[in-house]
Structures are given as structure tokens and as C-alpha cells.
Image: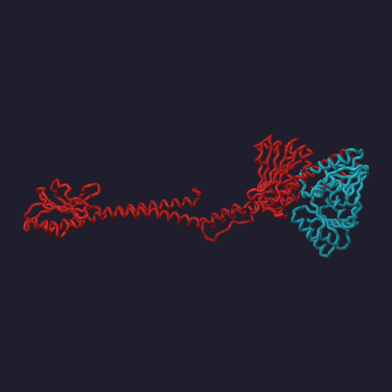
Amino acid sequence: MNTHSIRFRLTVWNAGLLAGLIVLFGVAVYLGLSHYLEWTLRETLSQQAKQIGETWLGEVGVSGESYVSEEINEHLSPKVNGRFVRVTRADGSVLFLSDEPENKRFDPTRVPPLKAQISQASLRKEHLTQASVLMIFALPFNAKNAGKYVIEVGASNHEIERVLHGLLLAIGISLPAIVAIAIAGGYLLMRRALKPVDEITQSAERISSRNLSERLPVAQTGDELERLSVGLNRMITRLDESFQHINRFSADASHELRTPLTILRGELEAAAQQSQITPELRETLGSALEETERLSRIVESLMAISRLDAGEARVEHTHFDLGELTSSTTEQMRLLAEDKDIALYCEADERVGVEGDRARLKQVIVNLVDNAIKYTPPGGLVGVKVFATNGRALLEVIDNGVGIPGEALPHIFERFYRVDKARSREMGGAGLGLSITKAIVTAHGGQVRAESVEGRGSQFLVDLPIAGKLSN
Amino acid sequence: MRLLLIEDEEKVARFIVKGLTAERYAVDVASDGDKGLELAQTYSYDLIILDLMLPGMSGTEVLRHVRRRNERVPVLVLTARDALTDKVQHFEIGADDYLTKPFAFAELLVRVKALLRRGAVSRANILRVADLEIDRLSQQVRRGGQKVELTGKEYALLEYLMTNAGRVLSRTMIIEHVWDLSFDGATNIIDVYVRHLRNKIDEPFERKLIRTVRGVGYTIGREEGL
């Protein structure tokens, strides 16, 4: 999973925010509920304490202390209800102490006696044991003609704890579940929302200088993504226009150069035809003709490149065997190698089918093999290989010649680039051979790469989409 | 033989006319499409050389009109564009051959001659230049009565030179004809082959038959002139 993707980050942020909010909400509910429960308990306890005081203890002077104890046991039944009830006289002696409740939550005898007389009603917590905490409401009471008492009514806070514990449990279980659902749902929603982005990306990847007439799909959603694709499409339109402009210029320029070149060549040839001219003049005219031819070749090549770049040149579209084409072409060039005493090896797998312009691809082979022979000294080796791998057809041309300096390597496919100015001109090149090679390969949906160690040799690798193994 | 040249570039027309006249052809020139079509429909020409980029009616239109009247006259198209689409399209309309500017006049001449004799010439089995002879049936080569062994490509090159003996063949023509490479690269493969061929048929003899014409190409035979 790509942790840098918008989808991932937004999902994580959303889930984090949601989890934080739920925790905050849980804390608020927990505090509110615990406060409410304690308040309710205090109300109940204080009411019972008042009941004890006003109903029974108020009459203690008349009906006696044992009556009070009986009434408390009978009406409040602290044993059954799990209540702690204690009535203490002014001298600290205990008038009434409830029994241990049936649920045995606490032991009433362990509640420490009151240390001093209290003058105001109060609520306190007694920690009897680790597990048993008692909430005790103490109420001072003046009985008619019978002196002062303190009434204490208490209850284990176990009930409160239980409710709060249940709440914690509910939050603890539901939080991860809710967050998990939010993550999954958010992730799916984001994927739906971002799907157009994927489509835009894929379409944009497909568009290169050769298919600038294509446009990105525009979803009519009126959202940011529609604006993005519309904006990108406008940019592609502008690129397309400037590319067309450049290509039209190259084509026009080449075209305009041809006519004067034709005239120049024709006139020179006609002049050289004259039988009465001196050998020196014939030599001069011949030299001028050679240069005219070179100029024509450059114009030719430039036009070829601009047309290939414009995607016009793939008219001949056949399915053929690259291996067969390579071995036959290499065979045709064998003499060039033999002439320089270079060993030329060709190891071409057959039935490596590719689709495209056979003549153009033949030119690629000729250019690469011709280069390898040119830049390999006598006694060297040139190897040509064709094979299929991973759905690609590969053509490899290796030599152990002079190689290409590291700083020149990134530029060798540029137009008019020469590694060694003096040397390559002497060999008649214009620095366009590799540009044409690249333009042809690119027009066929392939790639060409070069690797080289200066003084050790070079390797050129052409990588074309395979068009299936030829059946025959 | 009467030829019609439809070409608006005056200078191009001039050297073509000059060259063809020297080869004893009668050449009429039209400098635009309308005039060219008028001439083509008025007279019966043996061959029309047609430039595509013309003022007024375009070369393509002229070709269409000529072919609509079902004229069987051979048409050689000249163009400053060499897009393959153009080539295919014009062969479909009915051009017989196609030459891209700039071209060597020698090449134009070879194509003109080829178009004019199309179908009419029985190709001789034995070709001779001085004391060099080749037998096209057995593919045997003899110089001064002695048998010369050639490789397949060397033979193809020699045969092409000999069928056009006395005429200069450009490297473009040779590479297209002998190597079926449809491009004009910087490769010097032709020069290497010619050298090998010379070693075999010229080296041992005093009289050299294959000549280099600088800036144009190679020829075999006649020594006078170029």
C-alpha cells in the first residue's frame, strides 16, 4: 500500500479524527454519568437519612430506642437492600448498626466509628477493603427531648462502578469497531472519489509527443477533477499546437531546401558533363557534388525525423520476423566488417514477431551495425543479437571498439551531436543517424538505450513491443 | 521520342531539358498544371515527367485527368516531398515511377529509359562491356575469356552496372536496386563492394572498366565524357 497516497493519508486522518472524537465523547459521557449516578445515590441516601430522623428518631424520647431499631429494620430492611445504616448517640455509642447485607458487599462493623460530633450533613467515602468502597451520608439530628444523634446511611458504590464499567466496556468495544468501519468505508469512498484521478493519470501517461491529438477523459461531474482534466486538456492542446508548428516548420524547411538543392545538383552535374573542362575543374565540381549530396542527406534525415516525430511515418504496417530481418541485414553488411578485419557475429532467434515498418526497422539495424563497425578498430568484434523476453523483442548490438565517453553518453541520440567532431565528419556522418534510429524506434512504441565504457566498447539495446511469436 | 516535362521551377526544367536533349529526346516544357494538361491532351507523348507542386492545377490533379482519359502514357512523378503516403497515393492514382528531389540527373535518366523501354525490350542473356561478359542465365562472369568468381552481391552489383553500361548510377540507385534498402544512409557499404568487385575484374587487367564519378556514383564502360 502506498502510504503517500492521498487516499491512504485522508483515510488515516479521518480515522484518527473520528477515534479522537469518540474518545472525547466517551470521556464526557463517562464523567457525566458518574456524576449523575453519585448525585442520585446521594439524594437517595439523604432522603433515607431524613426519613430515619424525622419518622422514627424524632419520636425516640417517646417510643424508646429499640422501637427505632425495629422500625428501621422493618421499613428500610438494610440487609435486603444492601444499605449501611448507623445511628450514633452524642457520646459516640451506637444506637443502631445494620447487619451485613445479603450480597456481602461490605462489612458494617468495619466502618470506623465517628471521631467527633458533626454539625452539618456530609458525604464521604469509606474504603473498607480494596474492593469495597462505601458511600456514606451523615446527617446530624436533634431528637425532641433526647439529645443529639448522627444518622449515617451508606451504600456500596459497586452499582455505580458496575454501570460505569459497562459503559467503558461498551466504548472500548465499539470504538475499534467504529474506527475500523470508518477506515474501510472511507477507503472505499476515497477510491470511488479518486478513481477519475487514476483514469486521468493513466491517460496522461499514454500521451506523448506522437499522440498529442488524444485527450484525457472528462467526467461531467462539475467537480475539481473535471476542472483538472479540462485544464490538462487545454495544456495538451497548446502543446499539440506548438509541436505541430515545429513539425510543420521542419517539413516546410526541408521542402524549401530541396528545390535549390535539385537545381544545384543538376547544374553541377551538367557542368561536369562538359568534355572540354580541365581535370582540376572536374575535381572541384566533383567535390561540390559530394557536398551537395551530403546536404541532401541531412535534409532527408531531418525531414524523416520530423515526420517520425509527428507520427506520420508508420504507413507501412506489417507483421514480420525481427530475427530474420536482422540476420539477413547483418549478412548484407558482413563485407563491411570483413573489409576492416572485424569479426561480425549474429545470433538472432527466429520468430520474434514485431509489427511496423520493415524498411524503417531495417534502417535501425543498418545504422547500429554500421556504427559498431565504424567505431571498432581492425581485429575487433561486433555482435548482433535478437531475442524475446518478457513480451518485448530485443535487438542488441555490441562491440569492443573505442566506446563512448561518459559525458557524451546522454547526448548521443540528440540531433547533430557528435562524440568526436573531427573523426565522425571524416567518416561522412552528420550526427543524425542515432537520432533517426531513436525516432524510428520511438515511433514503433519502443526504446533504445546505450551503454558504453570508453576504450572498452559499446552496447546498444533496442526494445520493441513484441507482436506475438510468428507461427511460421 | 517525345517527352513532356511539367515543372514550374525554371532552373530545374532547364537542366532536365538540357540533359534529355543531349540524350536525343525531344522535350516540351509546361510551367504550370493547366498548360501541362492541355499539352498532354493535345499531343501524344511517349513519357510525361510531372512535378507535383505546381501553380494552378496541382500535379496530382493533372495525373488524375490524364489517367481518367485512360492514357497509357508512362508518368514519372517528381516531388519535393517524400512521405511514404504520397508515394503510395500516387502509385494508386497511376504514376509509373517516383523520384524525390534532389535527385542525380543520371538517376532521372535511368528511370526515364526504363519507363520508355518497359515491356518492349527483350533482356539479352549475355551482356558485354569490352572484354568483360556476363551470362545472366548461368550467372557466369568472364574477363578476357577467363572465368571470374563473384559472390552473389558482387554479381548483382556487376549485373546492374552492366545493364546500364555507360550510364552513371548513383549510390541511392545501387543501394535500392541491389540491397533493397529504401534509404540513403551514410553507410559506405557500396564503396566497399565496388572495391572488392574491382579487385576481381579490374585489378589483374590493364584496362579498368569500373569508374568512380565523384559526387555521383559509379559507371562501367565508355570512358569518354564523365
Q: Name the image quarter holding residue A67.
A: bottom left
Q: Name the image quarter holding residue B144.
A: top right
The reply, left or right, for residue B18 in relation to residue A441 is right
Would you say residue A253 is visible in this rendering? no
Residue that appears at 20% across and 49% down: A124
Would you say residue A101 is visible in this rendering? yes
- Give how far across and how far down residue B45 sits, in percent: 88, 59
Q: Height in image: B68 above or below A99? A: below
- Give how far across and how far down residue A115 sits, in percent: 14, 45
Residue that appears at 85% across and 42% down: B197
Residue that appears at 43% across and 53% down: A14
Outermost residue toward the top in this view: A455
The reply, left or right, for residue B74 in relation to residue A136 is right
The reply, left or right, for residue A316 in relation to residue B11 is left
- Give how far across and how far down residue B192 sits, in percent: 81, 41
Tint applied to chain B in the drawing:
cyan
Tint applied to chain A in the drawing:
red
- Give how far across and how far down residue B34 sits, in percent: 82, 61
Quarter of the image that includes the C terminus of chain A: bottom right
Residue that appears at 24% across and 55% down: A39
